[in-house]
Structures are given as C-alpha cells and as structure tokens.
Image: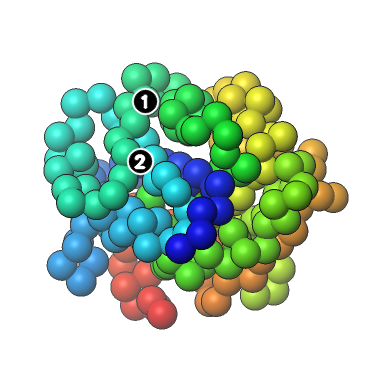
Amino acid sequence: MAKTGICLILLAAGGSTRMRGADKLLQQIDGEALLRRSARAACDSRAEPVLVVLRPDDAARLACLAGLAVTPVISSQWQDGLSASIRAGLAACPPDCTGVLLALADMPGIRAGDLDALIAAFPADNPGAICRAAMPDGSPGNPVLFGRDHIPALAALKGDAGARDLLQRHRDRTRLVALPGQRARIDLDSPEDWESWVGTRD
C-alpha cells in the first residue's frame, strides 16, 4: 500500500462525564470495546501512523488496544479539553507528514473506508486544503483532514471546542465528503445516545 503521508490522530482522552460512571470507550459493540473498534478502523485505513491520545495511567483503555498497530500518546493536560489532546497528538506526528486526520474515538459508525474517502479527496499538492466528513445532505461532521499548513493553528488551539473556530474561518477551502447514513454525526456521549444508536445502527 502506497504511503499517503497522512497521520491519523484518534482522540481518546475524554472523561466520559455524561456516562454516569461508565467509560463510554470501553462499552462493548459486537463483543469489542468502542475504542478498539475505532482504532481498528484507523489501522485498516491508508493513514500512517495511527496515534491514539490517552489520559495518563489509563491502563484499561491502553489494554484494549493490545495487538493493534497504533502508537499511544499521553495527554498530560487532558482535563484542559479536546484542544490539549490535539496538541499532544500533533507533537507526536512525523515532521514530514502532508496532513493530519483528526478522528474522535466515540464515533462508532466510522469505518476504514470512510477514513480512506477523506484521504482520497485530499489534494496532496495543496497543504492548505481541508477535507471534512459530512452527512448525505451536506451538513458537516467528523472526522476532519487538515493539510500541513494548518498544523501551527491546530497546535495553538485552547479549550474544549477543538477545531470548530478554525473550520469556521476556512469554510471556503473545506471540501465536504459525504459519508453514508448518520456516520459523520453520531457520537456516543451518554447512555441515551447508546440506546438510540443501537436501535438505528447501519
């Protein structure tokens, strides 16, 4: 498989605060933890390397990645929000990568083919490009692939909004890539989210 130069950062350091005591990333889907399911999809894609950002001393999440070709990255400031995890992942990216694919570990519908669709849509000769997953009706979602020109701005993010403001500023250079069904929008933050998704999963 030809190298794409795309580094995938799987963001998995969140605290599951809305799960009322359960760890959402360790919840089982078809006998597999959600985190492992997401990481396996990343490994099966054309992105390389695959970095998984975790909290310090999170042995349970780390253990469920056993045997997968991923590189764990620790976000020591994970409590500062999503941006801290993005910064930790970026610090571990190869300096010569052509782009960074940011993926959320709590999106169960995302598959390797969806990640590859974003990579295929990305113009390798345009380091300022952005490819963003979308719903079939064009509503934007996740994951998002940023060309290397955006890495300094991503590294300067603060708080828990992630790259929302950055994406808003660069709507004109963002290519939307439609994914089937609800894949680009469904994330599982609460027990109610899980119940709803189980009843409608594709």
Position of residue 69 measured from the top left corner of the image (x, y, whole percent): 28, 49
Asked whether the residues under the numbered discs 2 and 1 touch, taking CB atoms below 8 Å apart as contact, a structural biologist would say no
What number of labels is visible?
2
Identified by mark 1, the residue type is Ser
| Earlier residue among tags 2 and 1 | 2
Q: Quadrant of residue 78?
A: top left
119 or 11: which is nearer to us? Answer: 119
Q: Residue at x 54, y 48 (%)?
A: 6
Q: Residue at x 61, y 43 (%)?
A: 99
Position of residue 54 measured from the top left corner of the image (x, y, whole percent): 31, 34
Per the rendering, the mark at residue 75 is 1
Q: Is residue 106 above or below residue 160?
A: below
Q: Is residue 111 above or below residue 60?
A: below
Q: Which residue is mark 2?
A: 52
Q: Secondary structure at mark 2?
A: strand
Q: Secondary structure at mark 1?
A: loop
**Camera sees residue 49:** yes
Left or right relative to 24: residue 182: right
Left or right relative to 145: residue 55: left
116 or 104: which is nearer to us? Answer: 116
Left or right relative to 40: residue 100: right
**Camera sees residue 161:** no
Q: Quadrant of residue 59?
A: top left
Q: Is residue 99 above or below residue 159?
A: below
* Residue at the outermost front position: 2
Position of residue 188 measured from the top left corner of the image (x, y, whole percent): 38, 56
- Gap in Å between the C-alphas at discs 2 and 1? 10 Å
Q: Residue at x 31, y 67 (%)?
A: 195
Q: Residues within 10 Å of mark 1 (few under 14, many from 20)?
A: many
187 or 51: which is nearer to us? Answer: 51
Q: Residue at x 48, y 25 (%)?
A: 91
